[in-house]
Image (tube, rainbow, N blue to C red):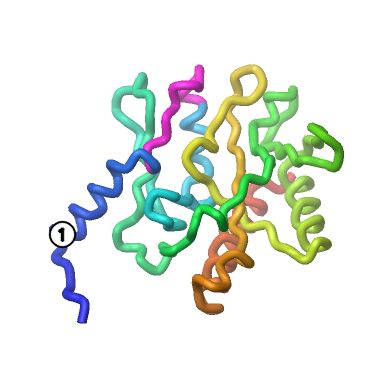
């Protein structure tokens, strides 16, 4: 029987986890850090965060911003009590880059949230309002017999045109996890990621 950890031991484990570089997001390459942080905060707990260091996927977390506004990094701190919203044994091989970006419409002279989706052809893409692009993205993945389950990881907060912030999206490949997890766990991951994404979609209808 696994011994129960004391509250102090649990706090220490989460403190140690917060010190991992994988959950410290470096903002050194971003010129307008305050704007980038504000943009990221709008997605807090709406997009799951993946840590390759501990092979975990977190759906409940806090983005901790240093009191020093000139600090070069922020920390993604998982909720230590949200065990049911934390998924372990998720290998890096099951998380792939999509080439999909989210960014403020102001970056291209528009308003609201926009999404950039890769299209067929080398280096080609299309830029659409989030609700329209999201619907198209889901349709395209379904047509291919797949599902789009976006997550964030260290390095996905970037800068777009005119120094505007953007988020690159990775995605979870459930087919890569079939030998690692039960069907129940796979369904839980799919439901949590999908529910968060639908909530994000509904908040950006235009």
Residue at horizontal 74 percent and vertical 23 percent from the top: 109
Residue 12 as seen in the image, left or right of residue 118: left
Q: Position of residue 181 (x, y in %)?
A: 50, 73
Count of all numbered marks drawn on residues in the image: 1
Q: Which residue is more in the foreground, 202 or 10?
A: 10
Q: Position of residue 118 (x, y in %)?
A: 77, 40
Q: Quadrant of the N terminus?
A: bottom left
* Residue 31 on the magenta segment: yes
Q: Which residue is more in the foreground, 84 or 180?
A: 180
**Residue 102 found in image quarter:** top right
Q: Which residue is mark 1?
A: 9
Depicted 156 relative to depicted 163: above or below: below
Residue 182 as seen in the image, left or right of residue 102: left
Please report the bounds of the magenta region as a residue range: 23-35
Residue 17 as seen in the image, left or right of residue 153: left
Judged from the image, the secondary structure of the residue bearing numbered disc 1 is: helix
Identify the residue at the far bottom of this view: 1
**Residue 161 found in image quarter:** top right
Q: Position of residue 206 (x, y in %)?
A: 74, 44
Residue at horizontal 56 percent and vertical 51 percent from the top: 151
Q: Which residue is more in the foreground, 85 or 185?
A: 185
Depicted 173 relative to depicted 84: above or below: above
């Amino acid at each position: 029987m696994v011994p129960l950890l004391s509250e102090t031991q649990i706090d220490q484990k989460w403190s140690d986890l917060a010190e991992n570089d994988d959950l410290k997001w470096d903002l050194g390459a971003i010129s307008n850090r305050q704007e980038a942080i504000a943009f990221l905060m709008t997605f807090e707990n709406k997009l799951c965060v993946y840590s390759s260091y501990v092979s975990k996927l977190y759906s409940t977390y806090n983005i901790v911003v240093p009191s020093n506004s000139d600090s070069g990094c922020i920390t993604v701190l998982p909720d230590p009590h949200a065990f049911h919203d934390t998924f372990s044994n998720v290998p890096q091989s099951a998380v792939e880059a999509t080439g999909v970006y989210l960014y403020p419409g102001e970056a291209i002279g528009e308003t609201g949230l926009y999404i950039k989706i890769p299209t067929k052809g080398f280096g080609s893409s299309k830029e659409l309002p989030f609700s329209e692009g999201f619907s198209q993205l889901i349709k395209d993945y379904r047509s291919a017999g797949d599902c789009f389950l976006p997550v964030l990881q260290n390095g996905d907060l970037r800068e777009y045109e005119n120094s505007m912030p953007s988020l690159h999206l990775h995605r979870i490949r459930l087919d890569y996890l079939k030998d690692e997890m039960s069907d129940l766990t796979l369904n839980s991951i799919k439901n949590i990621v999908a529910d968060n994404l639908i909530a994000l979609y509904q908040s950006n209808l235009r």
